[in-house]
Amino acid sequence: MSTDSRNNQAYLNRLTSVVEANLSDESFGVSELAKEMGMSRSQLYVKVKSNTGKSASQFIREIRLNKALELLLQTDLHVSEIAYQVGFSSPTYFNNCFRRYFGYPPGEAKQHPVVTPVETQKPGLVELKKKTDYFIKKNGIVAVAFIIIFGSIFIWYKYSINKRPDINREKSIIVLPFTNLSSEENNRYFADGISEDVLNQLTKIKGFKVVSRTSAEQFRESRLSAPEIANKINVNYILTGSVRRQGNNVRISVRLVDARKDLHLWSENYDRQLEDIFPIQNNIAQNVANQLQTILSPAEIKQIEKLHPINAEAYDSYLMGQYLCLRRDSLSIQKGIDYFEKAIEIDSAYTLAYAGLADGYYALAFMGHVDTDKGYKMAYRAAEKALEMDSTLAETYAVLGVVSIFGYWEYEKARSFFEKAIKLDSNCIVAHLYYSGFLEIVGEPEKALEQINKAIEQEPYYHMSYVVKGNIYRNEKKYIESINSYERCLELNPEYRFAYFQNFLNYLDLNDEALAVQTLQQYFSFFPEGQEYINELKPVYETTGINGVLKLYIEVIREERLSGLNLILSRIYSRLDMMEETLDCLEKACYQKECDCPRYLRYPEYERLHTNPRFQVLIDTMNLRSYFAKTIN
């Protein structure tokens, strides 16, 4: 070796030592290296380029990557931890650089032979390779070594081909509820919120079919394997995760697998302070897109990035509000509203908090737990406020639609809101669900079934979709189909007692009084007053017939004072041919805007009343005359 070559090698060794001494400093770059070497950036560039054929920045990056490979082979540190140790502030960028340089992701380092280009290897690795080669030659097994090497390359090639996602496969994915690993169980809301945010961001990506939160919830703590879940829910990919929170310190771990092949595709750990977690969800969504070979458009990236507020405390309050409102009981919803309002106090421009308020107030008004006029008005204002800040919120348009139906009886306005929601997001389940209910009210049953079937296709595990479908069939007097729909609802949510009541009426219309009484017994078991009467139902039926059962039922619901009391009573009175009492209850329900009063007027029980003047006044009061034109004129 010439003197110049030895000097150049010594110079490169010195450069390498300086970089290694500053390896974990992500800000240590070309300027810092030049300063350490006592030369300008341009002098450093020329020197490195002439000796290696690489730029100074490439030279530094390859030293970091080779050190990363050493750590991956010699330690059990996680990829993200190694990325930070070798000076990459972004694990994603590190993954991309490592893959480009070595030909495989860092998570697979131990599965591959060391094939780093010799000119970029550190002297220690070069020496190791020389010793290994000498050992092989000395023992006369060069041929075997070549077989092993080429065999390893072949196996690696076959493995990498198998792991590569098929770009022609449907990009269907389920985000399973993230596991709460925090020491406090009450941090579950935070883990659930993070997983739902990731899910919502994935839905913004064109070409992705994302299973809804409700369906994913079916697999919380499931022991099924990835292929078993894939077959059950018909998806190709599964994203799992866990969240550990200690005060303001948060660790989020995620893992993407090819569910059909049960193969790991990508994983990452994120350690952040609470105020720094917002980019994580964006990063997860974009990494999933990258793994599934999907190029995000600028518009999709913007949609993903705009979902979060600036303030971490506001976000935390929003997550708690969302968690509580999803329980769907009045007490939880009211508490959820309080958290949404707290989030807005902290960040007055927090769009999703206003959207949460709109949904919460709508639910309370619909269930009769607040003054209906006030509740619907609050819901409408909150929805308008949310849409002023972000006009792309499909679910918020859907909320405006149902508020327009039940709060203001403005049906064509509601139709336009639903159509707007579906145009913005054809996968918006609540839009299809609410739109179906609307179409049922205005007398378009075929279109209503079309919409509810779309909702069920996207979300087969949501019980309310089958309730709406059961209502549509019942109004069309398809009682068997209606029963089947309600039974599917009860399979998914055995505590949804309204389904028992509807099937009680369905069995009566099928002249199966014995099954009707049996179903009513199940219905009574859900509330204290009803339980006291369960054992009386059969004797009453045997002595006084079905009319005696109906009269007993009136006693029960008057004591229970159920939500929608007048509407329920009106249906029982109509069965007893007590038409004046039926109309009295319908009028009270109408003027109190009780639950889904406009929908009730479609029920078969009231067909005999269509020509009654008092019923026609109700039709006019609720602005429904044009939709009943075929039956009331």
Image: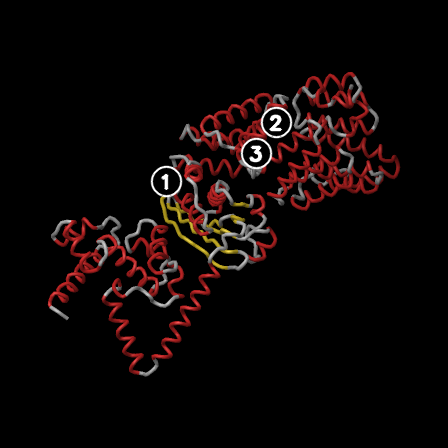
Residue 449: quarter of image: top right
- The tag on residue 275 is 1
Amino acid on which the number 1 mark rests in the picture: Glu
Question: Considering only order in the chain, which callout, 2 or 1, is on the residue closer to the N terminus?
Answer: 1
Amino acid on which the number 2 mark rests in the picture: Arg
- Percent of width and height locating residue 69: 32, 62
Disc 2, SS: helix
Residue pointed to by mark 3:
422
- Percent of width and height locating residue 103: 37, 60
- Percent of width and height locating residue 381: 51, 23
- Percent of width and height locating residue 74: 33, 65
- The tag on residue 415 is 2
Between circles 3 and 1, the one closer to the viewer is: 3
Contact, mark 1 vs mark 2 (Cβ under 8 Å)? no
**What residue is shown at x 18% (from left), y 62% (from top)?**
13
Q: Is residue 150 left or right of residue 505?
A: left
How far apart, in angstroms, are the residues tagged by discs 1 and 2? Answer: 40 Å
Q: Is residue 36 above or below residue 364?
A: below
Q: Is residue 74 visible?
A: yes
**What residue is shown at x 70% (from left), y 32% (from top)?**
560
Residue 209: quarter of image: top right
